[in-house]
Image (cartoon, helix red, strand yellow):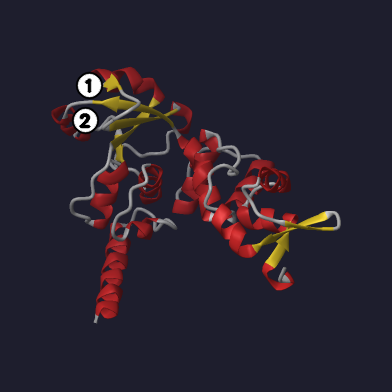
Amino acid sequence: MNLNSVVPVSEGAKRVGCSPAIIRSLIRSGKLPATRVGHQWFIEESSLERVSLRDSFSGRTLSQRLAWSLLANLEGRALSLALHRQEQARLGQYRVQSHEQLCHRLRGRASRISLSATSSSITRLRSDPRWVIGGSDAVARYLNIDGFEGTSTFYVRKSLEEDFLDASLAVPDEFAPNLYVALVDDAYWPFDSEIDHYVWGSVAYLDCREQRLEGSKMALLWPPLTDNLDVLKVSAEQSDVREEGVGN
């Protein structure tokens, strides 16, 4: 064992963004290789990097209240969701967690329903101002990615759930859905009806990541670059220049 390439359980947990107890559980189950020296376990850094990509130890997701507070903070937006001091401290801790861990925790931002609907119904839904467009549609719009397709996603206030279902003419479908509705409690609804016809860039990124979609330049949306489309456009153009330089 090379002592220069191993870390103890406490340090491994800190790097991954979970508790030491979860790391020990992974070691006992054989999912995380480790070597015991005396009473202490040591983990190869390379093994820790591979295991950090798993969702099995990501811990609890955040409540909608904390999830939207954290997303708004990342986006540089202000929400009228008052947090007490302990909650503010927790959000500060979450911000420095690993990317995988943070993305997992932010799954709690909405409750998702899987549906199937006709293409004409989905087209009508996109023009309805009562809900906000997410997922691949938002990513394609922000980053001007042609042909980037995935399951259509709409963010809907909980109080409008029945209205959405009536308008969509959709049926439940857990096996091959082409439509997701992400329900957000009215008290935590983060979007401005006057300017947010599409979700924030970070939310669109999370939607597609959870659908295991990958697209050119999609990583530009995370870390969040706010909703400033000029910033996104400039970043995308810079990325094109870098890619052309590599190609040459």
Which residue is painted at 70% across and 56% down in the image? 34
Query: Residue 147, percent across and down?
Result: 18, 51
User: In the displayed structure, does residue 155 sit left or right of residue 241?
Assistant: right
Q: Nearer the viewer, residue 88 or 142?
A: 142
Using the rendered image of the protein, determine whether residue 69 is visible from the camera's viewpoint.
no
Q: How many marks?
A: 2
State the SS at label 1. helix
Task: Report the quarter where the N terminus lies.
Answer: bottom right
Disc 1 crowd rating (10 Å Cα; few below 14, some 14-19, many 20+) is: some
Furthest residue in direction bottom, as rendered: 248
What residue type is disc 1 on? Ala
Residue topped by disc 1: 167
Furthest residue in direction left, as rendered: 120
Above-or-below relation of 205 to 181: below
Task: Report the quarter where the C terminus lies.
Answer: bottom left
State the SS at label 2. helix
Q: Nearer the viewer, residue 122 or 149?
A: 149
Disc 2 crowd rating (10 Å Cα; few below 14, some 14-19, many 20+) is: some
What residue type is disc 2 on? Leu
Q: Which mark is residue 125?
A: 2
- Of mark 1 and mark 2, the one earlier in the sequence is 2
Query: Residue 27, percent across and down?
Result: 69, 48
Q: Are marks 1 and 2 in contact (CB under 8 Å)?
A: yes
Q: Nearer the viewer, residue 94 or 57?
A: 57
Furthest residue in direction right, as rendered: 38
